[in-house]
């Protein structure tokens, strides 16, 4: 009996032992099967990726917050003029940015060359109504930039062409380098609009002498930019030269000209990118050397004399003598007065004698606005 029991115990023991051996073997078999499936799946995935590429079938989750304005990344980003002229760039940053030049000459869009009217003023523009009438209907062909005293707050209505056209400005002093800094600042801001092709410097006392269409085509068809750059051998020309200007500028290259200029885009870029002549004029052309009469004429005559008409298109009256031209008041504005201006025909246009020599005139006091508006249609054609 005992032997049977013991035999039963042995049989049970053997059965349990056999079961314990079978279980690890089945686990091993399952693991190997899983590993084989993983390897097969990996090979199939690699084949699919190489064959068809990767396609994300899961839709990306869009954030619930969206910015108000998308960052522009098309051509408009480069050709659209700044909507706000009051930027935060320093002069160094501004001149650097304005010196960008496309290497491909042909524009990939329909470009209408514009005139940049750049007003260098102390404050108000008392003759603004005359300019408003002159510019009316030609909005696609001009831009306006105003450099005034930093403290001046212009109050033009939203309907005015001068509304929000002030640029960041700094104090300027007559006859000093700060005056040229202001002119470079105006040029640099105007260059940010790639459609601006012609750049005219004006003051608050300037007026147009003809209608917009005549002035626009006169400038557009000219082979030259209107910058005076003549050699004056007297005390107010070469007499202002400083030997320390050499070797960048020698006395034979020294030139003088009117502050009021018209430039094409190429010459405007020459001015804003200049780092060669600027230090010399800043250091060695100080009153009684008036830098605004010598810096640009001398530099441009050295760099691009063949592109200069060597005359100004802004008429002034020096007949009364003194360091400044005559200022005209209300009683001066007559038809005979303008006849005298228009009869001044001693000039060349594209190397041919011309009956039109001046497109603008100065200096007109605020009191002249009334009679100017009365005569504008009959005399100036607008």
Image (cartoon, grey):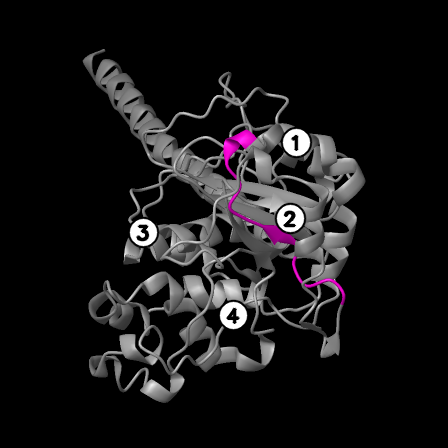
Tell me how many marks there are: 4
Q: Alpha-carbon distance for marks 2 and 3?
A: 41 Å
Residue at position x 23%, y 11% in the image: 1
Left or right of 19 on screen, residue 280: left
Q: Nearer the viewer, residue 35 or 25?
A: 35
Report x, y in % for residue 154. 45, 26
| Mark earlier in primary sequence (2, 3) | 2
| Mark earlier in primary sequence (1, 2) | 2
| Mark earlier in primary sequence (3, 1) | 3
Q: Quadrant of the C terminus?
A: top right
Report x, y in % for residue 14. 30, 28
Q: Which residues are magenta?
A: 355-367
| Mark earlier in primary sequence (2, 4) | 2
SS under mark 4:
loop
Q: Residues within 10 Å of mark 2 (few under 14, many from 20)?
A: few
| Mark earlier in primary sequence (3, 4) | 3
* Residue 361 counted in the magenta span: yes
Q: Which residue is mark 4?
A: 228
Q: Residues within 10 Å of mark 4 (few under 14, many from 20)?
A: many
Q: Which residue is mark 2?
A: 75
Left or right of 8 on screen, residue 366: right
Q: Nearer the viewer, mark 2 or mark 4?
A: 4
Rendered view: 97 above or below 169 = below
Q: Alpha-carbon distance for marks 3 and 4?
A: 19 Å
| Residue 371: assigned label | 1
Asked whether the beta carbons under mark 2 and mark 3 sit within 8 Å of each other, the answer is no
SS under mark 3:
loop
């Amino acid at each position: 009996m005992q032997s049977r029991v013991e035999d039963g115990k042995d049989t049970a023991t053997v059965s349990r032992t056999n079961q314990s051996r079978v279980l690890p073997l089945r686990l091993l078999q399952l693991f190997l099967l899983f590993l084989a499936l993983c390897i097969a799946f990996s090979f199939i995935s690699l084949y699919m990726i190489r064959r068809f590429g990767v396609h994300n079938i899961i839709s990306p989750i869009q954030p619930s917050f969206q910015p108000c304005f998308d960052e522009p990344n098309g051509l408009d980003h480069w050709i659209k003029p700044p909507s706000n002229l009051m930027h935060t760039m320093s002069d160094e940053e501004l001149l650097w940015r304005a010196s960008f030049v496309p290497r491909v000459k042909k524009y990939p869009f329909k470009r209408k060359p514009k005139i940049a009217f750049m007003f260098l003023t102390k404050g108000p523009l008392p003759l603004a109504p005359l300019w408003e009438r002159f510019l009316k209907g030609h909005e696609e062909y001009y831009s306006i930039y105003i450099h005034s005293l930093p403290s001046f707050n212009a109050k033009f209505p939203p309907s005015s062409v001068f509304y929000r056209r002030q640029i960041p400005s700094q104090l300027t002093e007559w006859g000093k380098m700060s005056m040229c800094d202001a002119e470079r600042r105006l040029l640099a801001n105007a260059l940010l609009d790639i459609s601006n092709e012609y750049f005219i410097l004006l003051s608050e006392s300037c007026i147009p002498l003809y209608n917009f269409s005549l002035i626009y085509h006169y400038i557009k068809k000219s082979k030259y930019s209107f910058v005076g750059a003549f050699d004056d051998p007297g005390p107010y020309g070469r007499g202002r030269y400083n030997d320390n200007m050499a070797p960048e500028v020698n006395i034979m290259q020294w030139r003088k000209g009117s502050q009021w200029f018209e430039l094409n885009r190429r010459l405007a870029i020459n001015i804003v990118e200049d780092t060669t002549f600027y230090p010399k004029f800043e250091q060695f052309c100080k009153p009684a050397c008036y830098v605004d009469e010598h810096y640009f004429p001398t530099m441009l005559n050295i760099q691009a004399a063949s592109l200069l008409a060597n005359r100004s298109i802004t008429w002034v009256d020096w007949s009364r003598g003194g360091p400044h031209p005559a200022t005209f008041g209300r009683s001066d504005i007559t038809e005979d007065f303008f006849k005298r201006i228009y009869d001044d025909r001693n000039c060349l246009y594209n190397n041919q004698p011309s009956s039109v020599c001046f497109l603008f005139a100065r200096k007109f006091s605020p009191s002249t606005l009334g009679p100017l508006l009365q005569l504008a249609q009959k005399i100036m054609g607008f």
